[in-house]
Amino acid sequence: MSTNVLKYTSKLTGKNILVFGGTSGIDFCVAEASLEYGATVTISSSNPSRLSTALSRLRTSYPSSSITGYTCDVSDLSDLSTLEENLTTLLDKVTENGAKKIDHIAFTAGDALSLPIVKNVTPTTLFSLANVRFVAPIFIAKLIPSYMSLAPASSFTITGGVNSSKPAPGWAIAAAWGSAIEGLMRGLTVDLAPMRVNVVVPSAVKTEIFERLGTERMETVLKDYAIQTTVGDIGKPEDVAETYLYAMKDQFVTGSVLESNGGRLLVYMDFREGKPALPVHNVVMKLEFVQSSVFCVLCLVSRVRDFKMRGSPCGFL
Ligand SMILES: NC(=O)c1ccc[n+]([C@@H]2O[C@H](COP(=O)([O-])OP(=O)(O)OC[C@H]3O[C@@H](n4cnc5c(N)ncnc54)[C@H](OP(=O)(O)O)[C@@H]3O)[C@@H](O)[C@H]2O)c1
């Protein structure tokens, strides 16, 4: 087969891809998939031991691939200059001091979801939710012009959540930051043009992020999320990872909210019942029932009318 034929599967071959996160969940799968496509991949993490475990898993699965990792705790925003300094150090390493430009950045890092609710929010809990997911991508964007080519072939993909469009009870603040991430993406698309910027918006995906709930509670929560989709299942990180890969490969996709949500936005929840409203096949059955009832009533009315007019119960036959 000539290499010309491989114009789709070779789109990421030899590309320099940086995944913020990369040690677990969706991020790890983005790193795996990028390696499968023949890219040179760097993962970053806030935790040296998790980083070394992830690197050895990736090296075992893809022995001939090019994979590197660095720690960079992007959550430390108590001193903004530290964040920028950390990011600059990381980007210098990944690009060999700017010599080897980054082609794609996938930002999937997210710390433990503390989920402050409005009735007891404080300034600290309000902003703590935003540090990694919202503020860090802004500082990355600030540095991007020094480390990436501002061209359609390059991309910066950040991560939101379906709760910004369809918040569950108690998710108002998370929904607000999620919406801010989508707005940030649109602004950056204009500011960094013609480079491409997109946001991936997953709904519930079974990753390590749920593990801190404990096995029993996690299973209940995941089951609850599964019934809130049209596919009737929870997401798999290796499926959602495809959306990040798509954002890298399609040089015409930019300024977009890319959903991977199992149809979550289309399921109407009956709040009184606390479960999804009638599935479609039940609705069809109900319609059929209504149709046949209407038909019966019309027949009856017609028979009565005929009986009155002709004095025969069979007059209409
Ligand atoms: N899973 C879902 O249901 C779901 C749904 C919607 C949106 N999302 C969003 O998608 C993103 C990925 O979620 P996931 O489920 O794959 O989560 P995950 O498995 O917990 O992975 C999170 C990643 O972020 C990194 N990270 C955590 N704290 C960090 C910090 N302070 N600095 C730098 N990196 C840090 C972690 O690496 P280290 O711990 O090694 O640093 C890890 O690689 C998150 O932003 C999450 O909010 C997830």
Image (tube, helix red, strand yellow):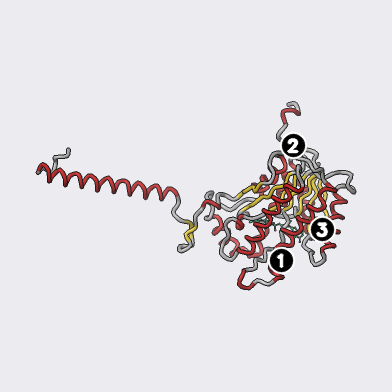
Ligand 1, image quadrant it occupies: bottom right
Looking at the rendered structure, the secondary structure element under dot 1 is helix
Which label sits on residue 72? 3
Residue at (67, 50) in percent of width and height: 200
Say which amino acid is labelled 3.
Cys
Q: CA distance from mark 2 to mark 3?
A: 28 Å
Looking at the rendered structure, the secondary structure element under dot 2 is loop
Residue at (79, 64) in percent of width and height: 77
Q: Dot 1 surroundings within 10 Å: few (below 14), some, or many (20 or more)?
A: some
Q: In x, y percent, where is residue 155?
A: 75, 45
Q: How many marks?
A: 3
Furthest-left residue in this view: 311
Which label sits on residue 63? none
Dots 2, 3 in contact, CB < 8 A: no
In the picture, measured across the screen, residue 22 lies left or right of residue 311, that is right
Say which amino acid is labelled 1.
Phe
Q: From where the camera sits, is residue 65 visible?
A: no
Mark 1 and mark 2 lie on one chain; the one further toward the N terminus is 2
Mark 3 lies within 8 Å of ligand 1 (Cβ measured): yes
Image quadrant occupied by the N terminus: top right
Q: Read off the residue under disc 1.
A: 127
Q: Nearer the viewer, residue 142 or 67?
A: 142
Q: From where the camera sits, is residue 311 visible?
A: yes
Residue 309 location, quadrant? top left
Q: In x, y percent, where is residue 174?
A: 64, 62
Dots 1, 2 in contact, CB < 8 A: no
Q: Read off the residue under disc 2.
A: 11
Q: Nearer the viewer, residue 243 or 30?
A: 243
Say which amino acid is labelled 2.
Lys
Image quadrant occupied by the C terminus: top left
Looking at the rendered structure, the secondary structure element under dot 3 is loop
Q: In x, y percent, where is residue 5?
A: 72, 28
